[in-house]
Image (cartoon, helix red, strand yellow):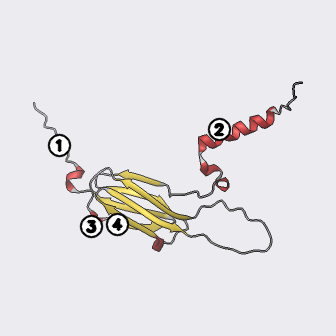
Amino acid sequence: MAELAVWRPLQELRREIDRIWEDFFGRMRFPERWEGFEWAPAVDVSETEEAVVVRADVPGLDPEDIEVNLSGNVLTIKGEKKQEREEKKENFYRMERVYGTFLRTIELPAEVEADKVEATYRNGVLKIVLPKKAEARGKAIKIKVEK
């Protein structure tokens, strides 16, 4: 005799949508489901004629907990966002902010002068200005007009 199975199309559809959502957006959408989740600050890397500029979002970090290193044309930013502990006997708290150590390694698009690099921290944004070497700046060539 054949066994009957209960078919629940809405539950199956929900599971499939959840799986597709997580595959597309990755683990960051549901950090509470992932043990050992690692984080790294978002960075913008831009270039002007004179310098390469890197901006990293590091809100809530003490500048003393951030280390910036330059080796050749590779910039490394590492640090630690320490978890705030609050003990309460009542009330439920949801923890979605990420904590822990991070490491970002960025290959720079041009050679820079290591001894002239400046790093500043303001409103949770670390800004690193890396002046380009003279030979990396390029040279504009003036076009002569012949008559």
Determine which residue is flagged by label 3: 115
Q: Are marks 4 and 3 in contact (CB under 8 Å)?
A: no
Contact between marks 2 and 1 (CB within 8 A): the answer is no
Q: Which of the two discs, 3 and 1, sits closer to the camera? A: 3
Q: Which mark is residue 20?
A: 2
Looking at the rendered structure, the secondary structure element under dot 1 is loop
Q: Specify which label sits upstream in the sequence, 2 or 3.
A: 2
Q: Residue 10's image quarter?
A: top right
Q: Which mark is residue 124?
A: none
Residue under numbered circle 4: 118
Horizontal placement of 80 versus 49: left or right?
right
Residue 142 percent across, percent down from the top left = 16, 42
Give the residue type at disc 2.
Answer: Ile
User: Separation of disc 4 and disc 3 at Cα?
Assistant: 9 Å
Mark closer to the chain start, 1 or 4: 4
Label placed on residue 141: 1
Image coords of residue 80 (percent x, y): 51, 67
Q: Is residue 71 left or right of residue 55?
A: left
Image depth: mark 2 or mark 1 in front? 2
Given this view, does label 1 or label 4 mark the residue nearer the observer?
A: 4
First reached walking from the N terminus: tag 2 or tag 4: 2
Q: Which kind of residue does numbered mark 3 sit on?
A: Asp
Q: Position of residue 49 (x, y in %)?
A: 29, 51
Of helix, strand and loop, which one carries label 3?
Answer: helix
Residue type at mark 4?
A: Glu
Of residues 101 and 65, the one drawn nearer to the viewer in this rendering: 101
As drawn, the residue found furthest toward the left would be 147
How far across and down, in percent of the image, does residue 121 sit?
Answer: 45, 68
In 3D space, how far apart are the residues under numbered discs 2 and 4 (Cα atoms)? 43 Å
Using a 10 Å C-alpha cutoff, classify the residue at mark 4 as few (fewer than 14 neighbours), some (14 to 19) or many (20 or more).
few
Distance from label 2 to label 3 (Cα)? Answer: 48 Å
What residue is drawn where x is 46% and y is 59%?
56
